[in-house]
Image (spheres, rainbow, N blue to C red):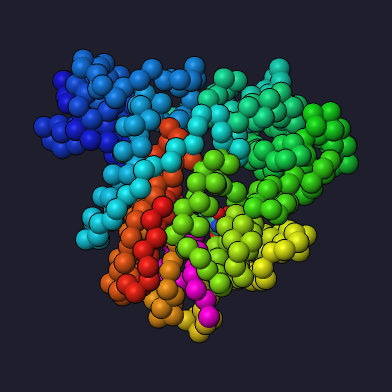
Amino acid sequence: MILTVERLGHLGDGIAQGDAGPIFVSGMLPGEVVEGEVSGDRLLAPKIIEPSPMRIKPPCSHARSCGGCLMQHASDAFVGQWKIDSVKGALAGQGLEAEFLPISISPPQSRRRATLAARRTKGGALLGFHARASDTLVEIPNCQLLHPDLIAAMAGLEDLVRLGGSRSQEIALTVTKSMAGVDIDVSGGKPLDSTLQLALARAVEAHGFARLTWNGETVALRSQPVQRMGRASVVPPPGAFLQATEHGEAALLEAVKTALGPQKRIVDLFAGCGTFALPLAEVAEVHAVEGDAAMMAALEKAARQVAGLKRVTVEARDLYRRPLEPDEFKGVTGVVIDPPRAGAESQVKCLIVAKVPVIAMVSCNPITFARDAKALVAAGYVLEWVQVVDQFRWSAHVELVARFAQPYIGRNTA
Ligand SMILES: C[S@@+](CC[C@H](N)C(=O)[O-])C[C@H]1O[C@@H](n2cnc3c(N)ncnc32)[C@H](O)[C@@H]1O
């Protein structure tokens, strides 16, 4: 059957109109004419008859086999516009529109944090990403996504898998580039006993890793895995949230600062380890709130070690069960809110009652962002602009910052 791809689905699959409904075609772009055999709602083994001008040669040698990247066959210009359009579409679904600032895309080889899958094998270890929609593990020595420091760590990571991995079950290694070497958090694998602990600690030493935690237990701490946040040096708890690239973090922070403008007293909601709170504390008092007590402790400790910051207070609190109440925003001039994918429906209701003048909303989910944006706009806030930040290049993932302001507050453009 010959089909023309009309659009992309939210996971990057091409969608064509078949006789009986939509047909999904992996790895295709809008406008492409493709031929293949239809099975259910999929076109199998599609052959391109007419390629899109937006099609490029995938930059990574693993692109065909690895499922880590979905969009390497499309130009940056195409992917950037697709991501902007997905946010515009979500807003339109709520009857909203906004000005969009130019997208900021992290460069190749800039991912400083990733979760790799691994298994011990008869001869050694297999470590990498899964193939698309499959359990098959694909090794990725030429990965174009990960920071070179993480690629350089692969041999050492394989040693850890050989020592503590299992042949029957995969383990997950969350690896993070820190200023002191790679920080590794493993889940799964053999239970720790003193022999394994010693062997793993030796491997950490030999490969110059900063820290290794194994199913929540610290096995080795060669040096503190420090992350810079503004002028502060933070040691995140094992496996803690961190923005995926330094470039993306800087772009999000810049947009948050622009959205807020000059401020006296800021509340940072879903604050993590202080990505926004710590740099913002260089110019304003900040109250940081986050569900994870260990992350709050890391933020607080880092803040105490920097001279000249404005007052920083922290609060470990479940913001879904117990959002900050309107009267807790007394004297607050601006809010940063960066919730998980579920968004921040109940917290937004409290922000509306509190009439916080300016809100910088950071989101990783256009759908919940648009829902929360609609509530703010319905309450009189103006959605002034949206900045999409693509720190998950070649994926379908979208991040954004948006400025909401009460109508009497001066406009702030990026
Ligand atoms: C998208 S991350 C943002 C973190 C931080 N703003 C940053 O940029 O590094 C969302 C944060 O929400 C926190 N979180 C998840 N569920 C929560 C809850 N119920 N209450 C408060 N914080 C929560 C997570 O621990 C995570 O740090």
Q: Is residue 33 above or below residue 97?
A: above
Which image quadrant is residue 40 in?
A: top left
Instruction: Identify the residue shown where x is 26% and y is 50%.
Output: 89
In the foreground, 228 or 270: 228
Q: Residue furthest left?
A: 19
Q: Is residue 9 magenta?
A: no
Counting from the top left corner in percent of width and height, residue 321 is at 51, 73
* Residue found 45% across the figure and 30% down from its top: 69
**Is 22 left, or right, of 238 in this rendering?**
left
- Position of 357 relative to 8 (above/below): below
Can residue 212 be seen from the camera position used here? no
Residue 184 screen position, x and y as percent: 71, 40
Q: Is residue 113 left or right of residue 185?
A: left
Span colored in magenta: 331-348
Residue 364: percent from left, percent from top? 44, 51
The picture places residue 4, in percent across and down from the top left corner, at 17, 26
Instruction: Name the quarter where the N terminus is drawn.
Output: top left
Q: Is residue 108 left or right of residue 120?
A: left
- How many numbered circles does the render carry? 0
Which image quarter has ligand 1?
bottom right
Which residue is painted at 23% across and 35% down in the image? Answer: 7
Locate residue 258 relative to residue 119 in the image: left or right: left
45 to 229, vertically: above or below: above
Look at the image and say whether residue 340 sits in the magenta stretch: yes
Residue 279 seen from this side: yes
Q: Residue at x 70, y 28 (%)?
A: 153
Residue 318 drawn above or below residue 134: below
Residue 115 quadrant: top right
